[in-house]
Amino acid sequence: MSVLLQTPLFDVHTKNNAKIVPFAGWQMPIDFGSVLQEHAWTRSKAGLFDVSHMAIIDLLADDAAEVVEKITPASLSTLAVGQMRYGLFTNDEGGTVDDFMATQLHDGLRIISNASRRDEVLAYLSEHVTQTDIAERKDLALVALQGPSSAEVLISLGLDVADMRFMTSKSLEVDGTAIEVSRSGYTGEDGFELAVPAGQAEQLALRLLDHEAVKPVGLGARDTLRLEAGLCLYGNDLDETVSPVEAGLRWTIGKDRRGEGSFAGSQRIISELLDGPSRKRFGLAPQGKRPVRHGDTLHDSEGQQIGVVSSGTFGPTVKAPIAMGFLPTSYALGDEVIAHVRGTKIPCLLTTLPFVSHNYCK
């Protein structure tokens, strides 16, 4: 059995009474006492998340963004320095290798991808992004400060973020430490992600936690927050068989990329853009109080299986069960399907996403 890794903030987590669990090869905090309270705090104040387990990969070449476009339908070569874009790496079959966040640097492109897909992404980049230095930044830690008080907190530390907008990044400094700050995150709330030298991460985290508006938040609330925001999770809503169009992420496909067919899986993806996919991701509103979960099957009124739940939980903000799942495109919003959950049949209405409106600073 491989040894689980620890992030630079592991001691901070244990001192704050975190419940530590294995996650993608790391020891990570699932909560600090209450997922519900941490979720609500992030929606109303500012939650501090440790996301140092994620892969930070720098591609060092002037044309790195252009080269990476061979394996993603996202428009990256149009990014100016400091601009960010969410996208998907696609395989030759049009499925998803991983989803990622890209930032244009002065000397290349920074990719942040999922911890669970680190090896696959590094191998995929090494295969296709040739003649480009690929540097995994293990020297950096990554923390996310999410919630409506986030900007106020960072400003109190002397960080000039007031004029930043969603999906932008810039280099700043606090206490003599260089920090790359982006106005981004995966909760649906306004917030920031801060890349900091690993040796300085604990000091930064403690300074943030000293602020009365900040509390630590674990992976449990990170999942309920992203699901309320209608955001995909790799391994649940995305995998190597799911295309960007099926996942409801056609907006990640650059308009300038849709007719060129120069990216991996373009034949399938462009065909689905033109003719529609056979299935797609829907929001599900289970009727009653019992949540449905990832892997639960979806059935029509006659009992025939027609789909599957990809993500599901209880939504603390909406105070009701929420879920997402894949169904044939012949279904429409307002239709009812039946989830089979351990012998119980739960009616679910197809509903719009997100369940909670986004509060990005645009």
Image (tube, rainbow, N blue to C red):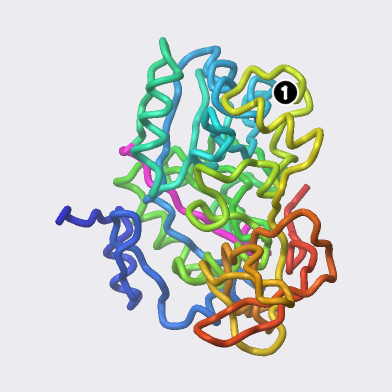
Give coordinates of residue 254: x percent, y percent.
Answer: 73, 29
Q: Is residue 224 left or right of residue 177?
A: right
How many neighbours does mark 1 have within 10 angstroms: few (below 14), some (14-19), or many (20 or more)? Answer: some
Q: Is residue 43 left or right of residue 89?
A: right
- Residue 280 vertical position relative to residue 125 in the rendered view, above or below: below
Give coordinates of residue 338: x percent, y percent.
Answer: 68, 77
Q: Is residue 148 magenta?
A: yes
Q: Residue at x 53, y 86 (%)?
A: 343
Which corner quadrant of the image does residue 84 belong to?
Answer: top right
Q: Residue at x 64, y 36 (%)?
A: 85
Q: In this picture, which residue range is highlighted in magenta?
A: 138-152
Q: Is residue 26 left or right of residue 85?
A: left
Q: Nearer the viewer, residue 325 or 306?
A: 306
Q: Residue at x 31, y 38 (%)?
A: 139
User: Quadrant location of the N terminus?
Assistant: bottom left
Amino acid under disc 1: Arg
Which corner quadrant of the image does residue 359 belong to?
Answer: bottom right
Q: Which residue is the site of mark 1?
A: 257
Number of disc labels? 1
| SS type, badge 1 | helix
Q: Is residue 43 magenta?
A: no
Q: Residue at x 40, y 41 (%)?
A: 55
Q: Residue furthest top?
A: 131
